[in-house]
Image (tube, rainbow, N blue to C red):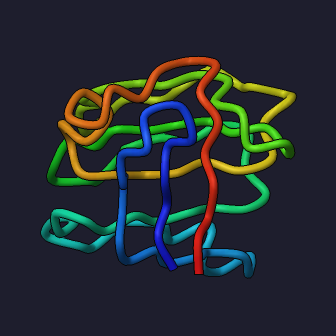
């Protein structure tokens, strides 16, 4: 499954991992050395995240049920926490630099493509 920005047509990720169980959502990217270029972790449901105990920065997109990006955060460093985005249905975690490279910003529509 790929993740595409509908406005730009840019591919944010070609390999999408979904974390939907409680255990998978709690673990997230913890314990990993990095996130490969072209990969993404989708945590669902999710309205906020933290990067405590992580070893690398990430890009983050909080996404509404309709696929609209509510908040795009670039280069979120380790040992940070986001505010709560009550309207978010899920969060997409990406390698740092992905949002800038794909010109993804608040208000863009994201689509999962099989």
Give the residue displayed 36% in from the left and 54% down from the top.
Answer: 11
Q: Is residue 8 above or below residue 11?
A: above
Could you say which quadrant of the image residue 40 lies in? bottom left
Q: Quadrant of the C terminus?
A: bottom right
Q: Residue at x 25, y 42 (%)?
A: 98
Image x and y of residue 97, in percent: 18, 36
Q: Residue 44, position in %: x, y? A: 73, 62
The residue at 46%/74% (across/down) is: 16
Where 31 falls versus 6 (above or below)? below
Would residue 84 be found to the left or right of residue 27 on screen? right
Residue 76: x and y in percent read 30, 30
Residue 18 image point, x, y percent: 59, 76
User: Is 6 on the left or on the right of 52, as rendered?
Assistant: right
> 2 or 19: which is nearer to us?
2
Please state which of residues 2 and 61 is positioned toward the viewer in this rendering: 2
- 48 relative to 66 in the view: left or right: left
Q: Is residue 49 above or below residue 54?
A: above
């Amino acid at each position: 499954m790929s993740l595409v920005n509908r406005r730009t047509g840019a591919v944010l990720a070609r390999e999408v991992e979904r974390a939907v169980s409680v255990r998978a959502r709690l673990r997230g990217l913890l314990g990993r050395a990095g996130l490969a270029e072209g990969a993404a972790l989708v945590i669902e449901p999710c309205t906020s995240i933290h990067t405590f105990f992580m070893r690398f920065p990430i890009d983050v997109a909080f996404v509404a049920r309709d696929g609209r990006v509510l908040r795009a955060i670039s280069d979120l460093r380790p040992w940070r926490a986001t505010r709560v985005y009550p309207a978010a249905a899920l969060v997409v975690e990406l390698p740092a630099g992905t949002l800038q490279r794909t010109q993804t910003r608040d208000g863009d529509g994201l689509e999962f493509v099989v």
